[in-house]
Image (cartoon, rainbow, N blue to C red):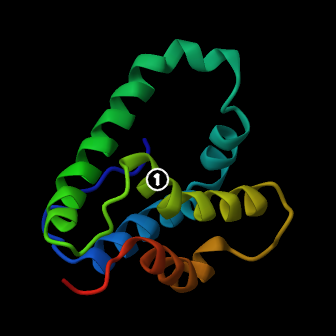
Amino acid sequence: ALPIFSLAPIDEAEAGIRAILRTHLSWVTGERRKAKFLFQQVRSEWLASIEAERAAENARFSAMIDRWREPLVETGWLRPVSKEVFVAQLLGPVQIMCRAWLGGRTQTDPSQHLQQMAQCAERALVSSRP
């Protein structure tokens, strides 16, 4: 199963960003074979057979992000960008690094870059203090 966790106790923008990135990187590096399989099979036809399960997982992840993100946007702690832009800014760079590692284009464990990737995501997504 993919990592699903709760952001409910995290009410700070930076801490939530780091928790999401840390959890994602932990799963990819801890479940390297599964992650590599999923990253490589993303366009395979066999995925149609698990589409409902995948859609349900994605919906749970999206709802968790919304519950955590929306109050922080309302109070000015996070920038008011669309959810699509938020997720792309947050996970896009991490996904690129994970794909490079899983594909053998780099030997460096992507979790070693957590701090720098979190800082970049924070600069893009966290507002100046309200």
Q: Looking at the image, which residue is at 64% across and 55% down?
A: 32
Q: At which x and y percent is residue 34?
A: 61, 45
Q: Residue at 36% across / 35% down in the picture?
A: 57
Q: Secondary structure at mark 1?
A: helix
Q: Residue at (39%, 51%) from the top-left corner?
A: 3
Q: Provide residue 118's location: percent of width, then percent of height.
A: 48, 78
- Is residue 13 positioned above or below 53 on the image? below
Farthest-out residue, right? 105
Residue visible at 62% across and 57% down in the picture: 95
Amino acid type indicated by mark 1: Val
The residue lying toward the viewer, choosing from 71 and 16, is 71
Locate residue 130, reporting x and y percent: 18, 83
Q: Is residue 1 left or right of residue 9?
A: right
Q: Is residue 127 above or below residue 26?
A: below
Front-most of 72 and 8? 72
Image quarter in which the N terminus is found: top left
Give the left or right position of residue 114, taking residue 55 as reference: right
Q: Please name the residue that numbered disc 1 is placed on.
A: 85
Choose top left, top right, bottom left or bottom right for residue 41. Answer: top right
